Amino acid sequence: MPGQVLGSHKVHRLMVCQSSLSISHHMSTLSQADLLNIGTHSESGDQSTANGLSHSWQALRIFVFYRFALALFLVWSVYSGKGPSMIASYDRILFSICVMFYAVMLVFSSVSILKYQFEFRTLAFFHLALDLFCLPILIYSSGGIGSGLEALLLMSVAASGLLIGGLYSIGFAALCSLVFLSEAVIADFYNIFQRTHYAEASVLGICSFTVAMIAHSLGRRAESSERLAKERGKDIERLLKLNAYIIQNLQSGVMIIDPVKGIQSVNQSALKFFNLDKTPGVLDDISEQLKQFYQNWLKHSDQDTFELERVDQPPVLSRFIQLDTDDKPYHMVWFEDYSVESKRIQQAKLVSLGHLSASIAHEVRNPLNVISHASQLLEEKQDLDESTRQLSQLIIRHSVRVNRIIENILKLAQRKPANLIAVDINTWILEFINDFQDDFHQYKQRIKVIAKPDNQLILRADLSQLKQILNNLCTNALKHSVNPEECVELEIHCQDAEIHIDILDRGAGIAEQHRDKLFEPFFTTSETGTGLGLYISRELAELNQASLVYLPRSGGGSCFRLTFAMHSQQVISL
């Protein structure tokens, strides 16, 4: 009964699902991001680069914010008189002017940082130079070395190691050491303060270099970690794109459903199954039957496989899968074309049948040879009457026919997998015609190409098997031609990314009642035919991922169309 849950009486249809279950299980373990991004194009390449730069900019913003907060504290301290006693203890006016200049410059530079008006390194050098200019003045106006403000300059040294790193941070530390030493020398030379601070200046110089080297080491580690994180991020992004591409181009249909929001994503195969142009919002937009199956599965999770009927098309096998996600449940629907899966099973059966037929053929050939040899010996007798001689010739003739059938069966059973290579069919078809006329002298000048595109048409095929297919089709066409002088025509054309090779003749054609059985083994309308030529040709075509069909020709005659997918070396940008 159409649309029912597959039961035990439909075990043969459950076999169709088995080839896709392992893939479905693998799909169910994919990350939620892989499945929810089916068919989307990632635009995070530039964003990841911007994120890499934003870490450095963020560090600079934090450094500027810290210094702006420090400047506000110093302004408050000097004008309120409630701050630490050593602030502006030597020259209040100079301290006030310097700290106001410092705060104003920080405000203006902050605007440049927020708007990215200058390069990062330029702004970093500017702020370090600003500290190198203003902080020594603030230290001097607060009583020189020993006031405690010299620690602020050491903070700038640490920032230089993190922001610019390398030799620049060491150079900045050297300048700070010279500043400390210069303050001690100037204060001693002009007797500005009561005591000298050479020892403290030396210690501060050593501390500057120590802090710079430690900060430089930490900066290098941070850069290395950031670079590694960016590489890992790019790898993850490429894998997400690759997973999305693979899912999007699967031959099986994949649909992701949010139980609350409805359909989240659908791959191209699923859209083709139901003749849709865009992702539907709910299951009702696809099929009322699919919605009923989904609701039934939610109630009975063990009944997860259904057969979905389509109008004027083969049914689709549907399987519902619960995705393992941490935050919220998602459901996946796996669609498989029943006709494709049935064909695979049929091919597997035919392979087994071919091996069995080959074994039988070997056993039949020996007695057949005995019969044929005995008939030939009987025919050589001189006293044989005419009726017996005719019977002997009949035995010999049919023995030859059976022997040809056996040979075809053995060839079919022993065929090898196709060795597909890319070939320009326009060039190859001319080589085939020359070889065909050399091999079949009786058909010389009776095969020609009537149309082919000027541009290259690349397809993938096993050239020896392709030659065998065309040999079979061309010899059949020539044998069944009404006019012995009539030529067989080859036409090559391209449509919808497919390459068609048409073999055309003006014979009697195929009666309509015989067309459905045309490619079945041992079916023939000829008294001398084996009924295996077209069957073998179609099997070889399928080995080459092609199709072979019969089309009636207007005006009389037949057209056998061999269709290949156009080969393109597509580059996936990851």
Image (cartoon, rainbow, N blue to C red):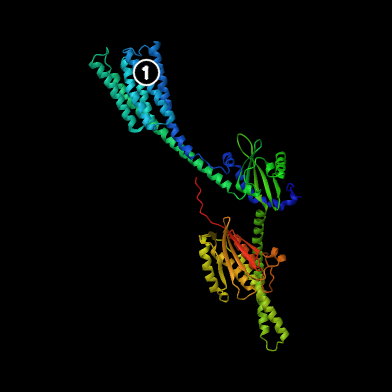
Quarter of the image for residue 537 reads bottom right
Taking 465 as reference, is 333 left or right?
right
Residue nearer the viewer, 394 or 507: 507
Query: What type is the residue that disc 1 sits on?
Result: Met
Residue bearing the label numbered 1: 100
Where is residue 419 drawn, in percent x and y? 54, 61
Taking 481 as reference, is 163 left or right?
left
Seen as rendered, the residue at the extreme top is 81
Residue nearer the viewer, 57 or 236: 57
Seen as rendered, the residue at the extreme right is 1
Where is residue 167 drawn, in percent x and y? 32, 32
Residue nearer the viewer, 208 or 295: 295
Where is residue 104 drawn, in percent x and y? 38, 21
Quarter of the image for residue 493 reads bottom right
Q: Is residue 286 above or below residue 113?
A: below
Q: Is residue 340 above or below residue 463?
A: above
Residue nearer the viewer, 413 or 67: 67
